[in-house]
Amino acid sequence: MKDMVVVGTALFAEVVRDYFHEYTDYRVRAFACHARYKTHDTFGGLPIVTIEELERHHPPGEVDVFVAIGYRKMNKLRQATYEELKARGYSFASFIAPNVKTWSSNRFGENVFIFENNVIQPHVQIGNNTILWSGNHIGHHSSIGNHCFISSHVVVSGSCKIGDNSFLGVNSTLHDSLSIGPENLIGAGAVIARDTREREVFVPSATKAFPKTSDQLEF
């Protein structure tokens, strides 16, 4: 059994702790955050240690860390914390759900978290500090860059390339052989059929409410 610290004190961090506890040999000893974000001494029944004092309580070599910070500011908050801890000599845990089939041709970076029911086909590469929530399809020979967040039920067709710091919303779809520029924000339900440029945003129109209420329909 190896000790680890989950970096983050929000819902994502709490979920990450549960997955590491349930499915791995890691023992989560504490949560961590920067001092400016610390509002309590404990979270989820475990102590909160400030990142500024992390070496004093849990030095590199004695624990691994996982940076469980979400996608705000195009994943750059998670990126900055990941890079800070890497520079300070920490090693990173990763998680791939047990029911996710992986292939010898796959390549995975560090601080990667892949939830259950993801389909990852052969020759897929996933960069450092990238999150795949549950139920996605990642087609063969595709690559996902560093510091990305793929939400749920996303379809990435074969031979796509997704640039660093991109976010793909629920049920978004990429046609095959596309190149998605860095820092793209692809909203829920978007269908992308062409290559994209850096920092492009795609937000489909939301479904409009019907002019009658449900009781008026006699459904």
Image (tube, helix red, strand yellow):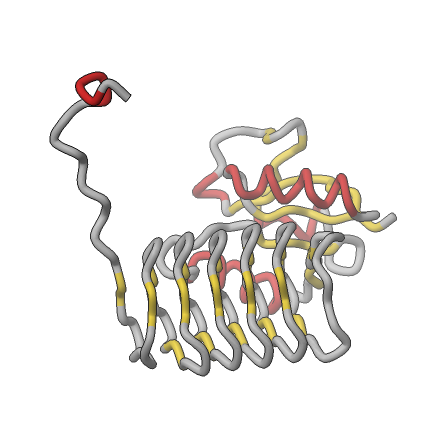
Q: Quadrant of the C terminus?
A: top left
The quadrant in which residue 16 appears is top right
Which of 59/5 is in front? 5
Going by the image, does 63 lie left or right of 33?
A: right
Name the residue: 43% across, 57% down: 77
The quadrant in which residue 129 appears is bottom right
Name the residue: 58% across, 69% down: 128
**Percent position of residue 182, x then y:** 38, 75
Which of 68/190 is in front? 190
The vertical placement of 217 against 21, above or below, is above
Name the residue: 26% across, 65% down: 201
Which of 65/122 is in front? 122
**Percent position of residue 205, x then y:** 21, 53
Residue found farthest to the right: 1
Residue found farthest to the front: 218
Which of 83/138 is in front? 138
**Percent position of residue 55, x then y:** 68, 53
**Percent position of residue 91, x then y:** 71, 63
The quadrant in which residue 215 appears is top left
Report the number of numbered marks.
0
The vertical placement of 218 against 13, above or below, is above
Going by the image, does 125 lie left or right of 213?
A: right
Going by the image, does 62 lie left or right of 150?
A: right
The vertical placement of 12 against 198, above or below, is above
Name the residue: 59% across, 44% down: 32
The vertical placement of 174 against 196, above or below, is above
